Amino acid sequence: MGEQNRETFGSRMGFIFAAAGSAVGLGNIWRFPYLVGMYGGAAFLLIYVLFILIIGIVCFIAEVSLGRYTKQSNVGAFKAIKPSWAPVGLIGIIAGFMILSFYSVVGGWTIYYFFRAIVGFGFADPSASANLFGGFISHPLYPVLLHALFMGITIWIVYKGVQDGIEKYSNIMMPALFVVIIILAIRSLTLPGGEAGLAFYLKPDFSKLTGESLLAALGQVFFSLSLGMGSILTYGSYLNKQENIPFVSTVVPIMDTLVAFLAGLVIFPAVFAYGFEPGQGGGLAFVTLPAVFSEMPAGNIFGAAFFFLLFLAALTSAISLLEPVVAYMIEEHAWERKKATLIMGAIIFTVGIAASLSNGIWSGFTLAGKNFFDFLDYVSGNILLPVSGMLTAIFVAWVWGSKNALKEATNDGTINFSWGNLWANVLIKYVAPILIAIVFLSSVGIVKF
Ligand code: TRP
């Protein structure tokens, strides 16, 4: 695609909605609460918010600036500045592949739960919710078919291109999702026995923090903000030269964090009220929420609305995962958009089949003690994203140069970026990369606290 006719977002709101649509997704409502539950509750939440503020927003600004400056997606952006750094972009492309393959499986779960909610969960005993979930995800056929449907819709939207694809579908669901989550939080917070869950979520016990949980929090920052694989970079490349990068790069992470925080307020009181296990892993949200819907007036309407909105949120995120992979094939290998979307989408779909089956008939096959699904989730989220995020920060600060990056971020100094110098001289140069490195070392036990 030539530079002159590269598609751009029609308006600032177009970019904010698309970036927020990318960020807000299953990461907020499915992945974040299960990590909080597994890695220490409130202490994890606190570290997470801290990392959002000093690493997430900092790296967000770097990615958007790099994308807009080079007008390239992941690999091309690195190449445009220094060709030898192209492999960093490739790490991101690989991460995107891995993430979308299991993400689409979970996207399929939201479709099942949408229909199941319409019928009504109506559990007399909350433990029935765990049985429903376990039975469904281990089924050899249904979750695979719904994964096919989810991936098919994702492919179809990316196939149609940026302007009339992403933008249109990103505009609708955020405010609605917000409202429904707040209503659910009120229901959950008023459940008898929910206080213990609130304490777990909001009263930190730092003895629970380990190097492993710090890494999980860091990985989740990248996962939830869509950083480290080129989603935000690629969207940045479609951003107009007049837009205010520091502003949009702060608004989106704040919205994203708010949604995740609210999801925890829905889930943890209910987890404790119903006696579920907070550290159970990836089933947490899908087991807990239906139990809540069972016990609220018009629970099937709220349930259906919730899972429909979650499906849309997952879809806008999935689009942003596929787009950089497709853009890479278009820009670096001169493929047509249609061919790139169909072929890459088909490969990701195939890997996702294996991920889905690993929750059932293929669960005997493990890698590093995890089934294939959890392995993809762990390696992409906790290793590839932080590594490529760290290398991207180093690249922007030291190879491209943080002065140049600041110039791009402030539209040649014409935009007020009050902490711009702090960002350029301290945060992106030292704080972000060094902190990421320390978290890595602590997770493998080299640095101890
Ligand atoms: N951020 C999305 C979520 O929370 C998922 C996602 C979209 C993503 N693009 C990404 C994760 C890029 C990592 C990298 O659901």
Image (tube, grey):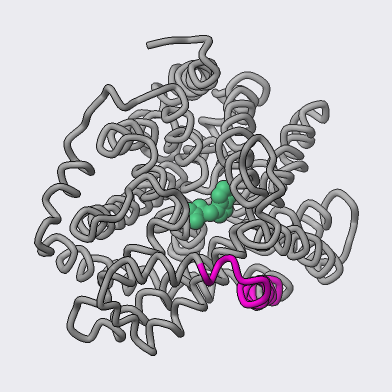
- Prevalent SS, magenta region: helix
Q: Is residue 107 visible?
A: yes
Magenta region includes residue 405: no
Residue at image position (65%, 68%) is 162
The picture places residue 123, in percent across and down from the top left corner, at 29, 77
The residue that appears at 61% across and 64% down in the rendered structure is 104
Q: Position of residue 160 (x, y in %)?
A: 71, 76
In the displayed structure, would residue 234 be above or below residue 26?
A: above
Q: Give whichever of 385, 6 is nearer the camera.
A: 385
Q: Nearer the viewer, residue 167 or 42?
A: 42
Q: Of 44 and 142, which appears nearest the observer?
A: 142
Indicate left or right for 167 with 48 as reference: right
The range drawn in magenta is: 135-156
Quadrant hosting residue 352: bottom right
Residue 24 versus residue 245: which sits nearer the camera? 24
Q: Tell me if 242 is positioned left or right of 76 in this view.
A: left
Please give left or right for residue 31 compared with residue 103 in the image. left
| Residue at 44% over, 17% down | 426
Quadrant for the C terminus, please: top left
**Quadrant in the picture for residue 163:** bottom right
